[in-house]
Amino acid sequence: MPAVSKVAQAEYKLLLQAVRSEGSPTRPQLAALCDLPRSSVSQRVKELVRSGLLVDLGEGQSTGGRRAGHLGFPQDAGTVLALELGSTHARWRLADFAASSLADGELPIVISAGEKAVLGMVETAVRDALPGLGLTVDAIT
């Protein structure tokens, strides 16, 4: 995606969070949920669809006008790795773009051992989990 203003970045983030929390909203629903003008939602959604971060899931029920299309995340959008590091533990979770958990784990660590040692342990645990999910490290975005 090209370089964008901070306002546009905030709107992209808001829209993606709304899709994640609502499941498969329509553009009018996104405008209401995010308190954004429909024209802004339309433009941002078009760019998110073009970039592959959102997909049109099909049309919903008509409410008297044109049927609104539902939006969602593509099945192959990627996998997200989240980490929580404490002084004595590391927690990790792999999730899809809809925030559905795919795998997670917890490891005892000594944070003072340094970033290479700690992150190396986490990397090993995550890599060990990937084959069971049918994923490779390239799937993590």
Image (cartoon, rainbow, N blue to C red):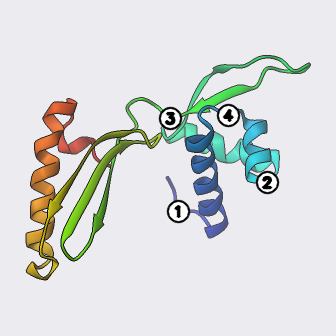
The secondary structure type at the circle numbered 3 is loop
Q: Which residue is mark 3?
A: 73
Contact? badges 3 and 2 (CB < 8 Å): no
Disc 1 versus disc 3: distance between alpha carbons?
A: 22 Å
Q: Nearer the viewer, residue 27 or 40?
A: 27
Task: Identify the residue under disc 1.
Answer: 3
Q: Secondary structure at mark 2?
A: loop
In the rendered structure, which disc, 3 or 2, sits on the residue that comes first in sequence? 2
Q: Position of residue 126 (x, y in %)?
A: 17, 49
Residue 103 at what x, y percent from top left? Answer: 27, 41
Q: Earlier in the sequence, mark 4 or mark 3?
A: 4
- Three-letter amino acid code of the residue under disc 1: Ala
Question: Disc 4 vs disc 2: Cβ atoms closer than 8 Å?
Answer: no
Which residue lies at the image location 70% right of the left edge and 45% below the top edge?
43
- Residue at disc 1, secondary structure: loop
Q: In the displayed structure, would residue 72 be above or below residue 104?
A: above
Q: CA distance from mark 2 to mark 1?
A: 24 Å
Give the mark, 4 or 2, whose residue is nearer the N terminus: 4
Asked if residue 5 is positioned above or below residue 13 in the image, the reply reads below
Q: Which residue is mark 2?
A: 35
Secondary structure of the residue carrying numbered label 4: loop
Depth check: give the residue in front, 86 or 120: 86
Spatial separation of the CA atoms under disc 4 and disc 1:
26 Å
Give how far apart the Cα atoms at labels 4 and 2 are. 14 Å
Real-space Cα distance between discs 3 and 2?
A: 21 Å
Q: Position of residue 119 (x, y in %)?
A: 15, 66
